[in-house]
Amino acid sequence: MYGPTKDPKFSHIEGFEDHGVHVLFAHDKKRPKVPIGVAIDVASPAQEVESGRNMNVDYWHYVREKLFKEFSSETAVLGLCGAGADQSPHILWRKAAEERMRRARGLNRLLEIARRINRAVDDAWIVAKNDVRYDVPFAHTILNLDLAMRPIPEADYRRAKAEIEKASVRKNRGLGFHWNNGIVTRYEMQQTGKTTHPT
């Protein structure tokens, strides 16, 4: 999520990445040419702006502004964080090239992310506007899963216990304390046989 990519040991980003932007347009029969709603699913949390002391909707604000101009100020825009887990919208790879392009466009990071999402929405709209349907079945399904928790190795448990003791001596109950406390709790839970989490 935040690892340094300049490290000589870094070779590539592992695992799956979802670059898809999923878009669903909602229409009113009285106004078929303009959507009354747009739901946009991006596999990333809206956290380009972090650690601030104000509440905001991050890049979604700029996505909405453009769509209000393109469609209508009454079009509802729903930004969804898809399966983004430990993803981040921060640029970690090809930073210099990405930064050069962003500066050349005269955009800040929020506007650049919004630009990319809006391009995907525009691309979907080109096709979707000619395929408006009013007979779509609507269903809501709930699936309960017991997902396997990552096993905590004993070495990690011992290291976390030691860090908690150090933090207790310093009377420092910051983020590190809570992180290590979570590791200890999870390890002790798995010792009782609990290895899944209901989701």
Image: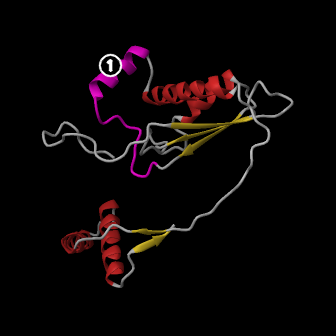
Q: Residue at x 79, y 42 (%)?
A: 135
- Seen in the picture, residue 73 relative to 144 is either above or below; the reply is above
**Residue extending farthest bottom:** 192
Q: Residue 139's spot in the image, x, y percent?
A: 71, 54
Q: Residue 73's spot in the image, x, y percent?
A: 73, 28
Instruction: State the image quarter where residue 178 is shown.
Output: bottom left
Q: Residue 99's spot in the image, x, y percent?
A: 33, 24
**Residue extending farthest left:** 8
Task: Please name the amino acid that badge 1 sits on.
Answer: Arg
- Seen in the picture, residue 141 relative to 94 is either above or below; the reply is below
Which residues lie in the magenta part?
Answer: 84-105
Instruction: State the image quarter where residue 143 is shown.
Output: bottom right
Q: Is residue 86 magenta?
A: yes
> How many tags in the picture?
1
Which residue is labeled 1 in the image?
100
**Tag 1's secondary structure?**
helix
Q: Residue at x 24, y 70 (%)?
A: 160
In the displayed structure image, the side of residue 63 where residue 52 appears, left or right: left
